[in-house]
Amino acid sequence: MRKIFILFLISTVSSGAWSQDINDLIKGSLEDANKMVEGYTMPALKAFGYGVNQGWYNTAKPHKKFGVDLTISASAVYIPNSDLFYKVDNSQLNDLELQSVDGVPIDNSGIGEVPTIFGPDRIPNYYVPSSDNTFEGPGGVDLKKEIGIQAMPVPIANLGIGLPKGFDLKVRFVPTLQLGDEAEFNLFGVGVMHDVKQYIPGVKNLPFDLSAFVGYTKMKLTADLDVQAGANQRATFESSAITVQGLISKKISVLTFYGGVGYNIANTKIALLGDYDLDEDGTTDATDPVSIKADANGFRTTVGMRLKLAVFTLHGDYTLQKYNTLTVGFGINVR
């Protein structure tokens, strides 16, 4: 499970995956370094972008005025098999050559399949012609082996507050947390649900709920690095995500069936920042050497069910999108 925690803290860059080899990568070529880090981390950036757009709702019915709920959800963002590996083409690299993966030499095409962060724990080996050195790249965390499913977990907590005229305000907030001595994390999100059925003549009295929803989440994690001579070295992991959806639900006794159709817009970025003295001669050879961005945009469809017993709720839903997602959670709900 330690590797899964590392995944959340993006310390595949800051402690043990790329950090041991960043010197070799940057010495070879900054362009090569960015290509390698991009191929390795891209699925994680996309998965997190999809994950933070989950867990906003479990009904289309807004609270009554000043009603509240606190809901904690965990989403499993499923990783497609196609994102367990990425291709490395030696003809597209400047000063790196992929030699083998897990001890098996690549073929004469000069193209090999290397594990992404979610792939199996197979170690690629690279050669740097300019320095006549070799080094090992990181293998994958092997999600299926680590947690039993090929999915990235993303936990979220929301506070919902009922407002007048069919509005519902939802807030997710984590103040800046110090994670040990070397990392800090913060998260903020706000969402608004509004009852639109009240405006539709002939529909507003029918026995179901219909709402519009928009939500925004911003997350940032910064981890200090100590991988090379230099100054102010750190890794940053940032994600901002927006979801716009139409929601519908129907309550039958203690059960509520709900669904949503909409669109996600998410951008996630990982960067290596600071000054790097690669040859340790007292001068800076590279500044802010790595910056990778990934978008997680597209249509989404969600179906789910909630059980409410007194003020306690349990819910589960499944979202069809590029990275399909299962979300389960519980809450305390006072309407």
Image: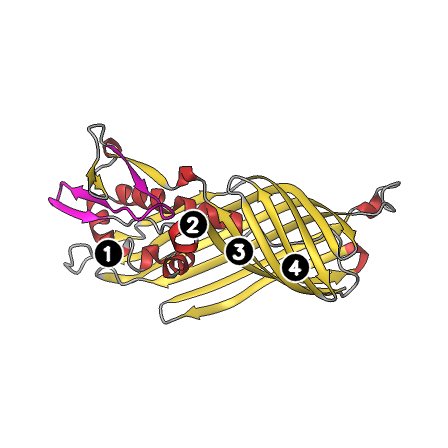
Q: Secondary structure at mark 4?
A: strand
Task: Measuring from the top left, give residue 63's x and y in whole percent.
Answer: 76, 59
The reply to whether discs 2 and 3 touch (Cβ–Cβ < 8 Å) is: no
Q: Residue at x 53, y 40 (%)?
A: 297
Of 126 and 34, nearer the camera is 126
**What is the CA distance from the residue labelled 1 to the residue labelled 3?**
30 Å
Q: Secondary structure at mark 2?
A: strand
First reached walking from the N terminus: tag 4 or tag 2: 2
Q: Which mark is residue 218?
A: 3
Say few, some or many: other residues with alpha carbon within 10 Å of mark 2 (under 14 / 14 to 19 / 20 or more).
Answer: many
Amino acid at pointer 3? Lys
First reached walking from the N terminus: tag 2 or tag 3: 3
Q: Which residue is mark 2?
A: 269
Which residues lie in the magenta part? 111-136
Question: How many numbered circles does the render carry?
Answer: 4
**What is the CA distance from the residue labelled 2 to the residue labelled 3?**
12 Å
113 shown above or below 58: above
Q: Which residue is mark 4?
A: 314
